[in-house]
Image (cartoon, rainbow, N blue to C red):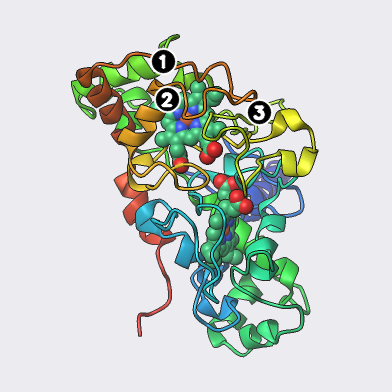
Amino acid sequence: MRPLIAFAALAWISVYARAGEPDAYDWNLPKGFPKPRVPADNPMTTAKVELGRYLFYDTRMSVNGKASCATCHKQELAFTDGRAAAIGATGESHSRSAMSLVNIAYSGALTWSNPNMTQLEDQALVPMFGERPVELGRREGDGFLSRLRSETKYRELFGKAFPGESEPFTTANVTKAVACFERSIISARSPYDRYHYGGEDHAVPYAAKRGEILFFSQNIACFRCHGGFNFSDASVSDRSTRRSIEFHNTGLYSPYPAPNFGIYEFTHDPADIGKFKTPTLRNVAVTAPYMHDGSARTLEDVLDHYAAGGRAHDNPNKDPLVHGFALSKEERADLAAFLQSLTDEELLNDRRFSNPWPSK
Ligand code: HEC
Ligand code: HEC
């Protein structure tokens, strides 16, 4: 009898210990959806996600108390800001459009065109401390961490998120928590997902089903860059073996796209001028205006752009896949209906991603 009891106790302890381990975080992913890659030194925990959410919405993150991450990344707009060019806490204009943070956990590189920026923990430092342009305008030693320490709510949240650390109020821990919150923003329940993965045949209208066929056709070829579960060839998951991702020039400019030169700014290879990351098309119906510079106002404009084979036909770097195609009025409406079927209302209204601070 004795060994059996010991065995039962051991089994119970190991199950219990596993449940208490940080990587027991429940991603709550539907069938067919892969898990994101997570850096080994910042495993997901519910406590870090919760702390990150408070920080993401905290205007004390900015030099003048006027902006937080959420100022430019609004939940109802799939974490974009509705502007062609983002505006920082001090009124400075960014040269690029704010990007959606939905399914950012899967992005193989971050921002429109930095192939070297791969970790959310590093990226969070850019809006906080960046000077060109100023986004939140913080400086090292600006008293931010002591302001956090004096907030009762943060003493509770930092304690839970970083248990056992004698000084949890560090910039590194701020970026870790913000990154965990960002990784938790998963969109996988759009009408298209319910139809495609969930077998709900009536979740999308016929127009969207016809549009899906066009999107995945060899001629129109959107899927060649906006492919896979996240509609972006820049997405990777824990199943991918790929280490780097592709960037593309979609023929927006002739010949050179000032002031944004794409990944050329990092690689200095002239063939890379005007190459940008392929953004996910999930929730694209609510993320206008489009492209890195917000130069396409509506989804109609985007379809016009591709149908014409880009705006700049003489651009030597234009991707051969942007070759133009004829599109009837009905086909255009079908493609638009398909893109609209990617809007995940559940995500846009999910309380877990909303502002946790009591409204004043
Ligand atoms: C002033 C507006 C603004 C603020 C404030 C801001 N962002 Fe952004 N965000 C942007 C813009 C613009 C981009 C595109 C940057 C680029 O291409 O260089 C971006 C890009 C990103 C990306 C890359 C997304 C992708 O698809 O690769 C992440 C992640 C991100 N922001 C997170 C944050 C976090 C976290 C905060 C707060 C600490 C924050 N942002 C604050 C405007 C802002
Ligand atoms: C050669 C690869 C490629 C092909 C083919 C392609 N795209 Fe794109 N798409 C991109 C890239 C790269 C961007 C970002 C370009 C930029 O901002 O400079 C983009 C941007 C977009 C955007 C704007 C998204 C946003 O968040 O601003 C939409 C919408 C879009 N594409 C839809 C489509 C559709 C629909 C098709 C098929 C008709 C298509 N794309 C074909 C690579 C491609």
Q: Quadrant of the N terminus?
A: top right
- Disc 2 on helix, strand or loop? helix
Is the C-beta of the residue carrying label 1 under 8 Å from the nearest atom of ligand 2?
Answer: yes
Which residue does the image show at 30% across and 16% down from the upper left?
A: 327
Tell me the residue that label 2 is attached to.
306
Q: Is residue 99 above or below residue 272?
A: below
Residue 41 is left or right of residue 297, and the answer is right
* CB contact under 8 Å: marks 2 and 1: yes
In the depicted view, which residue is nearer to us: 334 or 345? 334
Dot label at residue 246: 3
Q: Residues within 10 Å of mark 1 (few under 14, many from 20)?
A: many
Task: Farthest residue to the bottom: give it.
Answer: 150
| Residue 189, horizontal then vertical, whole percent | 36, 38
The amino acid beneath tag 1 is Ile
Which residue does the image show at 50% across and 20% down from the upper left?
A: 322
Quarter-wise, where is residue 49 in the image? bottom right
| Residue 335, horizontal then vertical, whole percent | 30, 24
Tell me the residue that label 1 is attached to.
220
Mark nearest the camera among 2 and 1 is: 2
In the depicted view, which residue is nearer to us: 216 or 112? 112
- In three-dimensional space, the C-alpha distance between marks 1 and 3, rounded to whole angstroms, equals 19 Å
- In three-dimensional space, the C-alpha distance between marks 2 and 3, rounded to whole angstroms, equals 19 Å
Q: How crowded is mark 2: few (under 14 residues within 10 Å), some or many (20 or more)?
A: many
Q: In this view, does 215 lie above or below 17?
A: above
Residue 272 is left or right of residue 44, and the answer is right
Q: Kindly tell me whether residue 46 is visible in this rendering.
A: no
Q: In this view, does 91 lie above or below 289?
A: below
